[in-house]
Image (cartoon, grey):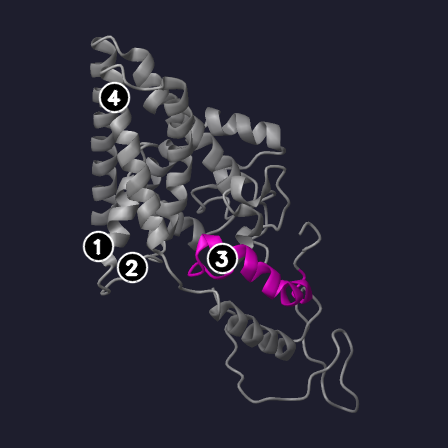
Amino acid sequence: MSEADPVTLRVPLVEPGIAPAGDAPAFPLGPEGLDRYTRRDLLKEERAIAQHFHGGAMWPYAVAAFGCFAVWLSFFPLAIMGQLNLPLAFVLSCIFATGGYVTSHEAMHSNIGRPGEKTRWLNEAVGAVSTIPIVFPFSMARMMHLEHHYHCNDPVKDPDFTDEAPNALMAWYKTWYNRQPGVDGSIHHYKRILAEMGTPEAARALKETMLLQLVFMTVLFSMAWSGYAIEAALLWWLPRHIGLSYIRFYLSWAPHHPREGKTSRYEQANIFKSRLGHVMSMGMETHLIHHLYPGIPNHRTRAAYFALKPILEKRGVDCSAL
């Protein structure tokens, strides 16, 4: 995710689009109208600013992940004992299912604990529990999300390209349609990609996907058989589907549309204004910052965006929305 440039010698800069005076050859200009030396200096400045937003306290993600998961688990015995406000539990289950992806997302990028650090176990544990409500094992989620970063907006290699739609209404429809049997989208698409990879890690992810889905179906069937079908539907089945649709719309479609041809570093995601606001859109209004610097935690991407905005504008990024 860097702009490789072996040149280290400082030379006088020229105005974009204007050739140097005298017999000196003009520097080739990039698509944003900047010569290579201007781009190099902007990249240095950009990295220096971005560095201030990396790291910070990540324990709130762990507290949120384990706390919400524990509360969600408690809903099931409470429902069976008749001690649960089911409408309220349904709303909270939808929030937990959707928000869990935010905490798992930090774990996917090892922002809670990197390999070799003492907090690595916490990173993996947060990732593991966060995606259980949406029946999406962390091993598969991480592999597919990293593939998305490696091949962002590539029609063939980006696992999330199947979410592309011409407008928001069709995008919401596709979040449901892609989960239907026989459709090559969403988790079905992920399974096919993992099967084609043929690596031990991919095989493990497929196995964990099968096991988690088996647990999901067993719980639903058992509760329905015992007379708690409505409770099972409102605590897990429906929140899972609502969460998956919300996640795929705001994390996949909204920040990347239109996907076609946008594979370069500063085009991989858009800066947009959500009608629901920054928090309700899961921080995706400034998702471009995440693609540029995945090590910046989700809660700091907005501040990082405004700090980097003057540089992004020079790089040709449309920042008019925010």
Q: Position of residue 116 (x, y in %)?
A: 22, 65
Q: Position of residue 209 (x, y in %)?
A: 26, 35
Give the alpha-carbon distance from disc 2 to disc 3, as whole Å: 17 Å
Report if the CB atoms under discs 1 and 2 are less than 8 Å apart: yes
Give the alpha-carbon distance from disc 1 to disc 4, as whole Å: 30 Å
Q: Residue at x 56, y 89 (%)?
A: 9
Mark 1 neighbour density, 10 Å: few (under 14) some (14–19) many (20 or more): some
* Sequence-earlier tag: 1 or 2: 2
Q: Where, by quadrant of the figure, is residue 44 drawn? A: bottom right
* Sequence-earlier tag: 3 or 1: 1
Give the alpha-carbon distance from disc 3 to disc 1, as whole Å: 23 Å
Q: Is residue 28 magenta?
A: no
Q: Nearer the viewer, mark 4 or mark 3?
A: 4
In this picture, residue 112 sits left or right of residue 280: left
**Three-letter code, disc 3:** Arg
Q: Examine the rendered structure and indicate whether residue 217 appears above or below residue 228.
A: below
Identify the element where label 3 is drawn. Answer: helix
Disc 2 target residue: 113
Q: Residue at x 22, y 63 (%)?
A: 118
In this picture, residue 115 sits left or right of residue 174: left
Q: Nearer the viewer, mark 2 or mark 3?
A: 3
Name the one closer to the observer, 47 or 76. 76
Give the alpha-carbon distance from disc 4 to disc 3, as whole Å: 37 Å
Disc 4 target residue: 78
**Three-letter code, disc 4:** Leu
Q: Residue at x 43, y 56 (%)?
A: 297
Disc 3 target residue: 300
- Residue 121, disc: 1
In this picture, residue 113 sits left or right of residue 280: left
| Residue stretch in magenta | 291-316
Give the alpha-carbon distance from disc 1 to disc 2, as whole Å: 7 Å
Q: Is residue 218 visible?
A: yes
